[in-house]
Amino acid sequence: MSGAPTPPPNLDEIRRLLTDLSGPDTEAHAAAEHHQTQLTKPAGALGRLEELAIWLATWQGGHPPRLERPLTAVFAGNHGIAARGVSAFPPEVTAQMVKNFLDGGAAVNQLCGFADSDLRVYEMALDEPTADFSEAPAMSDEDCARAMSYGMLAVEDGIDVLMLGEMGIGNTTSAAALCHALFGGQAADWVGRGTGIDEANLARKVALVEAAVARHRDALTDPLEALRHFGGLELAAIAGAVLAARRARVPVLLDGYTCTAAAAVLFALDPAALDHCQVAHASAEPGHRRLLRRLDKRALLDLDMRLGEASGAVLALLLLKAAVACHTGMATFAQASVSGKA
């Protein structure tokens, strides 16, 4: 006799998962911090590289930190709002770029090869874009929960760090609406040029975000409802991956504006929910810098990038590798017979 059918996922299940988050490993943190004091350098001389080594050990749950198996995950989804002219590129570019990822022709492929990271590309029902959120919620409860659950599968056993990125024409509009809904302010505070739109389309984008958030405001009972109303399937998947990484004690590097906006949903639910995350770079999108201030995060790189597709996250992996190399390879004062601080 077959069992009862599995019920579809729902956001209440996600809410329950958020009540049981893994905390930092205090023993690993203490061991890493102590080891830093023994290395042949003045205290703090390597700046944020020292902080990154300690952060990795703390959230990997062991000392020394390791970077033998980094993984880059790129989620791709299409948005109904793209039909409103909010992007310089048509929606079919999402699928075309996914093919480019799979063929090895995108920037992220070159960067993953250079940084020695595995790459996974997840297509999120590209032939079924989300609803136009200026008219209706972007996703149903089930679709949003299903996308988050799908994203959770990206946290594979044995990985040391997870780099997250996205691809989706129209998704900076989704990110802007989500941030406006979560953190207030004016719509113009969060809206940027995305793929390079002109002044007329920028004004249209601002007006669409402002009107959409006002339209749905009464239904936004919590941050997951904001994600359901304004996010895309790829944003929901990123939020799910961040959540699963926290539960599995896997450190995360977030890419640019859209990726950070997706993770910000968890921050809005619990300000400690992103402690296992670093933001890889400060996007050229102006809303990203405002968002970083709200999250109390300082990006690792600032290169005026706005590509997405985890490009900045993979670049930041090189900083993590440098941090681990110094932390694990440098001699201690005792090993090198170097006198310590007087």
Image: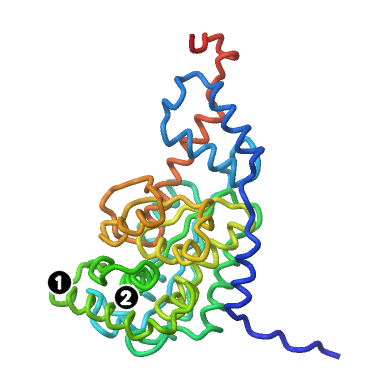
Q: Is residue 338 above or below residue 88?
A: above
Q: Is residue 160 above or below residue 50?
A: below
Q: Position of residue 152 (x, y in %)?
A: 58, 67
Splitting the image into 4 quarters, where does residue 1 fall? Answer: bottom right
Residue located beneath label 1 in the image: 198
Q: Secondary structure at mark 2?
A: loop
**Of 217 and 262, which appears nearest the observer?**
217
The amino acid pointed to by label 1 is: Asp
For residue 9, say whether it is visible: yes
Q: Are marks 1 and 2 in contact (CB under 8 Å)?
A: no
The amino acid pointed to by label 2 is: Gly
Q: Position of residue 197 (x, y in %)?
A: 19, 71
Q: Kindly report the distance in space between the C-alpha atoms of the residues bearing marks 1 and 2.
A: 15 Å
Residue located beneath label 2 in the image: 170
Q: Is residue 52 left or right of residue 195?
A: right
Q: Is residue 145 above or below residue 63?
A: below
**Of 238 and 43, which appears nearest the observer?**
43
Q: Is residue 202 above or below residue 2?
A: above
